[in-house]
Amino acid sequence: MRPISTVAAAVLTLILIPTSAVASDRPEPGHLKILTLSNRADLLSSGDALVEVVLPPGTDPARLRAVLATSRGPRDVSGAFAVRAGGRMLGLLDGLPIGQSLLTATAGGPRHRPATARITLTNHPSGGPVFSGPQVEPWVCTTQDNGLGAAQDAQCNAAPKHQFFYRRTSGAFAPYDPASPAADVATTTTDRGVTVPYIIRQETGTQNRGIYRIAVLSDPLRPWPAWESQPGWNHKLFYPFGANCNTFHNQGTAQNVQIDQALSRGFMVATSSLNVLGSNCNSIVSAESVMMVKERITEQYGEIRYTFAQGLSGGSIQQHEIANAYSGLLDGIQPNASYEDMWSGAVAEVDDCHLLLRAFNTASPALWADRADRAAVQGNAAPITATDRTVCEAWEGSFGDFQNPAFSRNAPPGAFAQSCFPAPTPDQQAQIYDAVTNPAGCRSTFQDFSVAVFGQRPRRLWTRAERAAGFGFAKLPFDNVGVQYGLAALRAGTITPEQFVDLNQNVGGVDIDHNFTAARSAADPGALRAAYRSSVTQDARQLDNVAIIDLRANNNLNDIHAPFHSYTLRERLRNANGHANNQIIWTFPGPGLAPPAPIADDAFLLMDRWLAAVEADRSAAPRNAKILRHKPPDAVDACFIGGVKVTDQTVCRATFPHYANPRIAAGAPMSNDVLKCELTPPDPRDYGVAFTPEQWTRLKAAFPHGVCDFRHAAVNRVPSVPWLTYAHGPGGRPLGPAPTSSP
């Protein structure tokens, strides 16, 4: 069973232009222009496109003629266009076939020569892909579980479903029947001062092999064309992202969009099951799904003013990676309990921890009996009580076998079952990889789920299982060659030279099946470059284009959501852009990870004010300059102590300290973005301690190729590239210029 399908994506093109920008374009005198408002002309999907024809001054709109030439022949679509509210000539085209179509518009007037323009529209399947590359297989449809009936095809498509709900005066949502109106419907006043019955329209449908859901204030008795939006919508979009990380080969579950905080103020709320990292741990597919959902909204409901996102843990990972890799999809982000990205911020840390705990517990347990020593090596605070976990112990308890491709096949009862399938049936269990009995089966590792990004291992590296399968598994970017675990603790005098030598002798590595190897792990060729280019390890080069409010729970315990990750992102922003002024961090005590309601509401309203001010700036300044220019005065770092907001960072840092992880404790920079280090011969003068001759001999033997020299740039590090398509193969190709109409 091969890990990728033969469904190919079409050839694509460059950076998404916000609709507010393209809609304001005016043609040169005497020229006509065609604008696609719902998406770029070459990234369309599902057979629809909201189009504007911008006419030259003095042109008679009644004389517009539009023809769509497709593989089925030409079709007159003039009737789709009309002068709508605001005097704009808009039309919703439907029935676009897969592939390219040519739209030609001609208009004139009694005293004007006809003006003509044409543009190529490229439509992609509703089930995807658009730019994410070949889709993983197998894939299980869940349309019936989500109330959409049986799937219509292998891409899990189904007709959308519309329902109405209302907010009770008692404060809960309930189904609403327009034929039998409820008597206890609350009212709400939006941020535009419009008071309406608190009734929402909820749409559930399928896109990109996922389940999307949209909710917005609505009058059930009124139609809703895209050019005549109902007054309850303020044209803002709130987009929640889901937590965790799993590589499920299924459509997932429709997410809750009945979020009062946003809906009551007039926001639309939308998301997809593929925006839940706990089901779809692939941020490129997640970004593609965001784009497709926003296209659907624009075509069916109207243009979006701006989009801001929110999400905890794995939801923060998606926000960071999407905002960096596909700039323009999100305008503001609110990561909560954040990680800077999926690979360096989570997976690599999990594997470092997995190896360290093996060394502590198996190789030399007597030497590592003091858990404070272990914590120092891991870069954590010392455990306060005997029951406190270190961060690595927390990681191991939940994600220790995350990278084991066959873990769910062999998992003990009650274990966290990373798997191709949630709660696999016996038939699905038989489809899961086993190195001996089913080498071509479904592998549940992060990189295998993203094989379209990383590519497959070259034949010269194939294991026996790969040879039996007949194809290479996905390239693995994990590398710990030269990493001197515990270096900071050694220099601080927390651990002894013998502990340091023993640890680095025994820590070892993992192979492609996550089995322990005595040798350190070396990244597969090409994997590091792919990780950096794709923003799977993101460098924040595009993150200065978004407003960032980082909401950080810090209960001073060694949870896997360690607070230092917020500051790692800050370091990356500084390294990439010379500042981190578009990021603020609000820290609050636990025990939960989500902020208390007053803090959440303040952050929501602050983000809205920030983005509204940016939107109102019609100057030609670049977006990153506008983000800084319109940063509200109260958008500053703060912590909350006893319910009081404190902006004195000396007080905040003393109350809520943050630490590091094993790589940073091994000498890596705070940016935590060195996946593979440059090597240098070990020098006894670099340690600040005295080794015995026997210890030094052992240490050099532990590092036959040298030790990490973090003064140099990371090996194979390349800048992230925005708007990559994987239709042409792993590693990605930059999309070409955005298509525009030509006269």
Image (cartoon, rainbow, N blue to C red):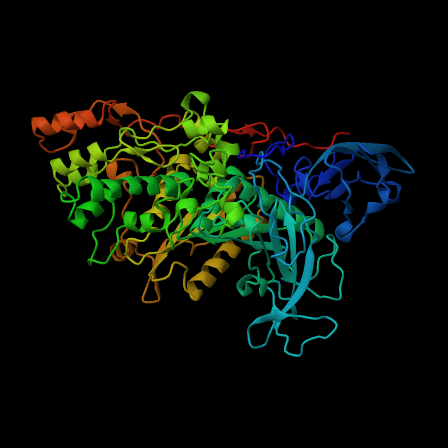
At a point 39% along the width and 35% down the height, the residue shown is: 513
Vertical position of residue 103 compared to residue 703: above or below: below
Q: Is residue 545 visible?
A: no
What residue is at 8 percent from the left and 26 percent from the top?
693
Image coords of residue 678 (percent x, y)? 30, 25
Residue at image location 80% in from the left, 40% down from the top: 57
Front residue of 669/137: it is 137
Q: Is residue 8 above or below residue 652?
A: above
Question: Is residue 255 rendered to the left or right of residue 564?
Answer: right
Extreme-front residue of the structure: 437
The residue furthest bottom is 183
Where's residue 130, x and y in %?
62, 37
Measured along the vertical axis of the image, is residue 118 above or below residue 179?
Answer: above
The residue most toward the top is 460
The quarter of the rendered structure image containing the C terminus is: top right
User: Do we see residue 359 in this rendering?
Assistant: yes
Q: How many labels were placed on the picture?
A: 0
Frontmost residue, 570 versus 451: 451
Q: Is residue 584 left or right of residue 226?
A: left
**144 or 34: nearer the viewer:** 144
Q: Residue 560 appears at what percent x and percent y?
A: 34, 50
Please state if 710 lies on the left or on the right of 439 as rendered: left
User: Residue 405's quadrant in the figure?
Assistant: top left
657 vs 725, nearest the viewer: 725
**Residue 195 pos. (x, y %):** 64, 69
